[in-house]
């Protein structure tokens, strides 16, 4: 009995790959899947999406191809739903690449200690930016609505359950009862 592929595994097969010094290897099926994922059939838009997802990688060797493949997989996994999400996801992917590059330079013990500290500080800044980008994407996708899940509530007879912020009045009352 053949193994059943998950949706994620099916999508992963449909992502084109970089093989050999930045050359993109893409089948007609993968091209159709990318068109579907990016909600466009315009060749220049697709080319721009692939370029933007991979442009932050300065390497042209096999390691660079691996990083470009990761960027394309991120693009497909995050699946932008509109132009604004597409721009934000491209920025997020570039920020991730910049952070990784700075971490690599900053952790290399052969580099000057001052330069290492500066690159590690830059990596931290990029990671902070990445968190804000992820939060912005989540807010964009949920319309800014927050969702509260109450997993377990026990209410005894005559009691009331309250969901939300509850504050206690200051000592001595503080309410407006008795005021005229």
Image (cartoon, helix red, strand yellow):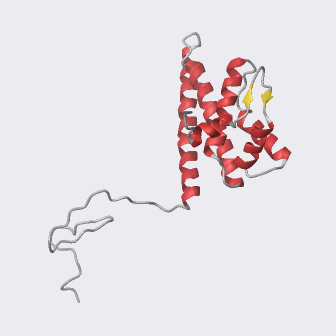
Which residue sits furthest front? Answer: 1
In this rendering, is residue 113 above or below 72? above
Splitting the image into 4 quarters, where does residue 11 fall?
Answer: top right
Splitting the image into 4 quarters, where does residue 26 fall?
Answer: top right
Q: State the image coordinates of residue 91 (x, y, percent, origin top left).
A: 66, 42
Residue 156 falls left or right of residue 148: left
Q: State the image coordinates of residue 158 (x, y, percent, origin top left).
A: 15, 74
Is residue 43 visible from the viewing direction of this image?
A: yes
In this rendering, is residue 170 above or below 76? below
Q: Residue at x 79, y 29 (%)?
A: 24
Q: State the image coordinates of residue 119 (x, y, percent, origin top left).
A: 58, 25
Q: Residue at x 15, y 68 (%)?
A: 156
Q: Residue at x 54, y 15 (%)?
A: 113
Which quadrant is home to the N terminus? top right
Q: State the image coordinates of residue 59 (x, y, percent, origin top left).
A: 72, 22
Q: Residue at x 20, y 83 (%)?
A: 177
Which quadrant is home to the C terminus? bottom left
Which residue sits furthest bottom? Answer: 180
Is residue 74 visible from the viewing direction of this image?
A: no
Residue 180 falls left or right of residue 111: left
């Amino acid at each position: 009995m053949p193994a059943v592929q998950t949706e994620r595994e099916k999508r992963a097969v449909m992502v084109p790959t970089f093989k050999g010094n930045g050359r993109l290897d893409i089948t007609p099926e993968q091209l159709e899947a990318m068109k579907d994922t990016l909600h466009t059939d315009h060749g220049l838009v697709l080319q721009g999406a692939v370029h933007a997802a991979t442009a932050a990688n300065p390497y042209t060797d096999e390691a660079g191809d691996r990083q470009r493949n990761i960027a394309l997989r991120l693009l497909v996994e995050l699946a932008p739903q509109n132009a604004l999400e597409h721009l934000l996801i491209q920025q997020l992917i570039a920020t991730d690449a910049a952070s990784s590059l700075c971490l690599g330079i900053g952790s290399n013990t052969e580099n000057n200690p001052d330069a290492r500290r500066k690159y590690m500080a830059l990596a931290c800044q990029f990671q902070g930016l990445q968190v804000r980008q992820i939060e912005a994407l989540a807010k964009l996708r949920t319309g800014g609505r927050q969702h509260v899940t109450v997993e377990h509530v026990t209410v005894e007879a005559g009691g009331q359950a309250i969901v939300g912020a509850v504050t206690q009045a200051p000592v001595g009352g503080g309410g407006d009862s008795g005021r005229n």
